[in-house]
Amino acid sequence: MNRPPAVPSPAAPLENLQDARLFLTKDIRAVEQHVFAQATPPNLMELAGQATAELARQLIGDRGTSILVFAGPGNNGGDAFVAARYLKQWWYRVAVVFVGDPFKLSADAAQAFEAWRECGGDVHDLVPSERHWDLVIDGLFGIGLTRDLADKPAELVSFINELGLPVLSIDVPSGLDADTGRVMGRAVRADHTLTFLALKPGLFTLDGRDHCGRVHLCTLGLDAGEIVAPAGELLGGNLLAETVTRRKANTHKGTFGTLGIIGGAAGMLGAAWLAGRAALRLGTGRVYVGAMDSDAPALDPCQPELMLRSGDAVLKLEHLSALAVGPGMGQSAAAKGLLKNAIKTALPLVVDADALNLLAQENIMRRAIIRRSAPTVLTPHPAEAARLLGCPTGQVQRDRVGAATELARRLNCEVVLKGAGSICASPSGRWEINPTGNAGLASAGQGDVLTGFVGALLAQGATASSALRASVYLHGAAADALVLEGTGPIGMTASEVIDAARTLLNRALA
């Protein structure tokens, strides 16, 4: 059979994904029920097990012949038994550890269990003493897991993680919530995850990025989108070309907008400067930085093209195309006043950092944000989102998609909930997960750079939705490009990301 297609690695900047649609567990169940209701439904378990075996054979190559398979008590375990049978037929040495009761298996899983026994396969309650395996297949638990792992299943997950061997997880790493990416007590750290029917959001956000490895998709010959509507999508590199147009020769700096940035309180001037530098390198015609610090220098020595003013002076400019408020702003009374005045403008507005914290403190400002006629973009990290929603940070992280969409709905704004697998959400309920980026972005100033990117695209005339999504994707892709070149993720700086993003944006438009 054809090998299942793989989702291109996020480390390949600007590469379009083959299928960006994301489906929740309830959607996958609806697809399965639709299939099972057919007069002669395909045997999805047989197809999934065969696809798993094919990928396992591809991964192991000529480097080994011995495979350890873990089969759980549900249909994920049935997939594992089918995979084990195919691998045994292909002359691999296969040991299967079964966690469950064969008399409680579903009809399909019980059939897969019996077929494995009939072909001469052994079933072990405990891990065999042999320790010379070349690949581990994790088929313990799939998308049906509803509670934290404990006891023997939890111990087996820890055992798998401690083996130090390549791991292929079936559908989703055992212990990972397929909808949220949350680890349910413990979860397998896979090198590869072969997911079936459609992509799931939990594979790409929160802990999913650390547990799934490279994600492969096998649709089992079905198009889930023809049966149920996708819940969300992954962002793709095509956003860049769709958001920013190629430049004509007959233009001038005014053609590409003017951005005002307000922030930079005493000791935090660098945050505002970083946002300004990012905006310039993403093509904004003119950038004004309004510093909160009255003793701020009149010149950015590393970026003399920035025009430095006070915050009040920037707000009085009549030729601005967009505003960004918050980088290094502080939470003083003066900062609060500038934020209130920025909200009153008819300009596209980006709200970040301390401006978000100030917004969380005042109902009046939140109501003013909701009533704005011009578009507004919020860029919170989880703690800032929690303050805005009035809930603990842990609650935001337990359901990142839900938190982002709720915040967008409540405040009538475009929102990005930053973090591993950032979530972009619109007031309409539309949402996407960003597949780009790496741990190098967990460093000082990266949020300021993202604010500058969003502000730059808004100033150049992009819609709030497009400006946000293209900026989030590009920000992560730039970090991925730096890693590919040998810079980071350890020690990657925000300034380096700015230059890498400029290179990628120009490349996308070439």
Image (cartoon, grey):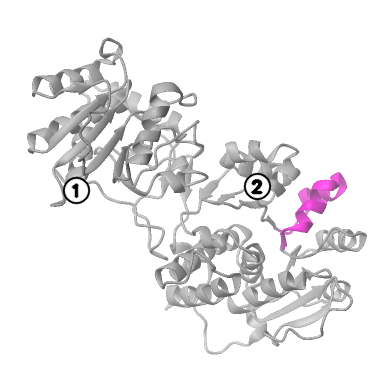
**Quarter of the C terminus within the rendering:** bottom left
Out of 62 and 164, give the one closest to the viewer.
Answer: 164
Q: Is residue 69 left or right of residue 485?
A: left
**Segment tinted magenta in the rendering:** 349-375
Q: Is residue 356 magenta?
A: yes
In the rendered image, the residue lying farthest to the front is 129
User: Distance of mark 1 from mark 2, alpha carbons?
Assistant: 39 Å
The location of residue 66, given as percent across then percent down, is 16, 40
Assess disc 1: are there few (<14), some (14-19) or many (≥20) residues with their C-alpha within 10 Å of its C-alpha: some
The location of residue 288, given as percent across then percent down, is 75, 78
User: Please, is residue 230 above or below residue 349 in the view?
Assistant: above
Residue 99 visible in the current orientation: yes
> What amino acid is at disc 2?
Pro
User: Please, is residue 429 above or below residue 319 in the view?
Assistant: above
- The structure residue drawn at horizontal position 30% and vertical position 43%, both measured from the top left corner, is 167
Q: Secondary structure at mark 1?
A: helix
Out of 259 and 89, give the one closest to the viewer.
Answer: 89
In the rendered image, the residue lying farthest to the right is 333
User: Please, is residue 398 above or below residue 357 in the view?
Assistant: above
**Quarter of the N terminus within the rendering:** top left
Q: Is residue 220 left or right of residue 369?
A: left
Q: Secondary structure at mark 2?
A: helix
- The structure residue drawn at horizontal position 89% and vertical position 76%, both measured from the top left corner, is 294
Residue on which the image places disc 2: 382
Sequence-wise, which precedes: disc 1 or disc 2? 1
State whether the magenta stretch is mostly helix, strand or loop: helix
Residue 206 numbered tag:
none
- The structure residue drawn at horizontal position 63% and vertical position 79%, both measured from the top left corner, is 280
> What amino acid is at disc 1?
Ile
Q: Is residue 403 left or right of residue 33?
A: right
Residue on which the image places disc 1: 60
Q: Is residue 14 magenta?
A: no
